[in-house]
Amino acid sequence: MNLARLDLNLVVALRALLTERNVTRAGQRVGLSQPAMSAALARLRRHFDDDLLARVGGHYELTALGQVLLDRTSTAYDVLERLFASQAEFDASTERREFRLLASDYAVAVFGTELARVVHEEAPGIRLRFTQTPPGVVDDTATLLSATDGLLMPHGVISGFPATDLFEDQWVFLVARDHPGVEDRLTRQDLARLPWVIYQRTYDAPAVRQLAMLGVEPRVEVSVDSFQLLPLLVAGTRRIALIQARLARLLAPLAAVRVVEPPYEAVPLQEAMWWHPVHTHDAAHIWLRETAARVGRRLVPGSASAGPLATGGEKGDER
């Protein structure tokens, strides 16, 4: 296909038509008259050799191809928007822009909160939007990264894309504060006999895969898609949960739980920010990456809190 012969404005029209499923509303959405949007729809129908919108009774519904194009058009629109928003120079103190980051609730709690604080102080016109990492990130990483500014995820899950390291963390276990069968340390037998609460997307926890190598198969009783719910589902029960040390110590005061070390040497967690190569030389994105790396380096080593910063002082006071 010769892209030079295509009118990229049709991407805008296509997105509006597929989203609104109404010619008049689609025109209002993008600032086109009803005749102009009707003409755009006719061109799109000729190009795809498909109606895209089919009248059913008194309204329009998407055809099978229209339904396929709905998601693809949204991604293409985001990519084009980011492409033409690229800048040779970027002054964070005066610019107004939104950065979208894919991240788990863990990454937002222990790192994103501090990143947001620093951005608020240094770049008041910059907005951050944290979006939950979708389940298919390992299956279609390139598409996801092309439509966002970055992905906060530990090493060992994806590869083949540029990344900057942020901070290191360790895996620990949570048990109820008054758990009758667990002392200061779990045993491997405890891991096999006690019920578990797990984060249901196991690709975010390479340490879970490590258990299989040790011959331990967790007896899962509850699974959730939020790391921050784990303490609440452990408190007052016999359950155990594998969780990041920074988050565990941050949340432990909020629930009747305590932190215990694993009975094996758990692989450490190195959190990183990943991005699509198309962003590499964009001045705004360079600022975002450098700011994120700086915030990550300043997190107090081994601390669960994203607030205190290591500044070289003996007490780690922020200056």
Image: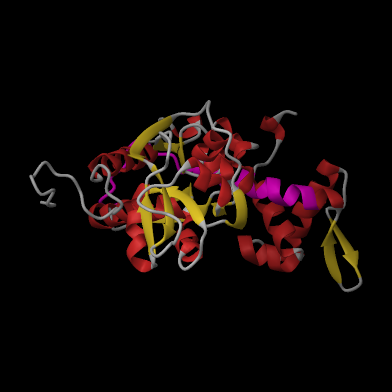
Q: Residue furthest left?
A: 314
Specify whether residue 5 is in view.
yes
In the image, which residues are magenta?
A: 67-96
| Residue 100 percent location from the top left of the image | 47, 50
The colour mode here is: secondary structure
Q: Where the N terminus falls, by quadrant? A: top right
Left or right: 5 with respect to 204? right
Magenta span includes 84: yes
Pick the front one: 242 or 74: 242
Residue at 32% x, 42% y is 90
Specify whether residue 96 is in view.
no
Left or right: 278 with respect to 95? right
Pick the front one: 128 or 59: 128
Q: Residue furthest right?
A: 57
Pick the front one: 114 or 26: 114
| Residue 227 percent location from the top left of the image | 48, 55
Residue at 25% x, 51% y is 93
Pick the front one: 237 or 153: 237
| Depicted 228 relative to depicted 93: above or below | below
Residue at 43% x, 33% y is 267
| Residue 246 percent location from the top left of the image | 34, 50
Residue at 40% x, 33% y is 265
